[in-house]
Image (cartoon, rainbow, N blue to C red):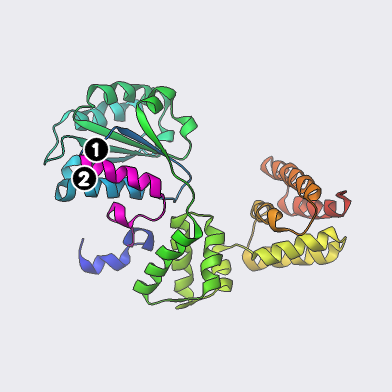
Amino acid sequence: MKPEQLDLLPWTEKYRPKTLDDVAGQKDVISSLKAYVKSRNMPHLLFAGPPGIGKTTATLALAHDLFGENLAGNVLELNASDERGIDVVRGRIKEFARSVSLGDVPFKLIFLDEADALTSDAQNALRRTMESYSRITRFILSCNYSSKIIEPLQSRCAVFRFLPLEETDVKKMLEKVAKEEGLTVEDNAYSAIFYVSEGDMRRAINALQGAAIHSDKITADLVHKVSSRAKPKEISEMVQLAFKGEFVKAREMLNKLTISYGLSGEDILLQIYRQIPDMDIEEKKKMVLIDKIAEYNFRMVEGANDRIQIEALLAQFPLIKE
């Protein structure tokens, strides 16, 4: 890649860690992967966890630490959501798996990203390929939902569960990006980015880049604006007004949220749900509130009007008994 092309990359790619030492969080997983690199041996692996928490990054960093300059000839990366049929397993994967590795590492690596998108037939065909060529080829399967991977494949792999990143890990990476890009980021802006990202590093960096387009000084208000997320305080205030029976004021607050942030009904429901643990209300009310949110979320999923359902939910709050 030419140096002048580097700035054209989204920041999530521009600042992707190249080695295992640079990967944020997931300390136990990274420790095990480093041991595999040191021993030059590893089983087939299955990485499971939510999006944006380092599964693909850890795989590419592992491949880099293993193969170094011989990376291109020894690693095959496929996105199973694009190439999910049995023909891919019988064709590209099998052809690559049967060839001998280059360099001093005795095996090659096949990385199947989003492997939970593979069809059942493709997963069953993959079983035999993994067994037949395990001496010269290792597989890494990455998925959001391990339950969608058939048991025979899971039993052939060492399973690693990736967890949402901690706020300190996200902040450390964002501080590095901000320094490189010459940004001034307020402390409460880091907290705001973590709130909207929910431990997803990719979403966090995208939020920072989106805010940086508008200003070199990143504030919490700017983060919430560009991320289309209301401030937790505003959501909590709307709910408290509804609990007090001040429906008109709560409805005005709802208007403000939908107009200022462009939130959909489901977005507002999810933010109310996230605020429940921090609300200064009785535990029994919290339980009833969650039940009500689930009911109205189901209605919206089934096609009911978002605005009517959110207002109906707010109207229910004064009726919630202790």
Cβ–Cβ under 8 Å for marks 2 and 1: yes
Q: Mark 2 is on which residue type?
A: Leu
Predominant secondary structure, magenta span: helix
Judged left or right of residue 293, residue 126 is: left
Q: Residue at x 30, y 30 (%)?
A: 88
Q: Is residue 39 above or below residue 123?
A: below
Point out residue 308 in the picture as x, y percentages from the top left corner: 77, 52
In the image, which is nearer the foreground, mark 2 or mark 1?
Answer: 2
Task: Specify whether residue 36 is in view.
Answer: yes
Which range of residues does the magenta coloring cover? 15-39
Q: Which mark is residue 66?
A: 2
Task: Specify whether residue 254 is in view.
Answer: no
Point out residue 38 in the picture as x, y percentages from the top left corner: 22, 44
Q: Secondary structure at mark 1?
A: strand
241 and 298: which one is in front? 241
Disc 1 target residue: 109
Q: Is residue 2 above or below residue 155?
A: below
Q: Residue at x 29, y 21 (%)?
A: 128
Point out residue 158 in the picture as x, y percentages from the top left corner: 36, 33
Asked whether 33 falls inside the magenta stretch, the response is yes
Q: CA distance from mark 2 to mark 1?
A: 10 Å
Q: Mark 1 is on which residue type?
A: Leu
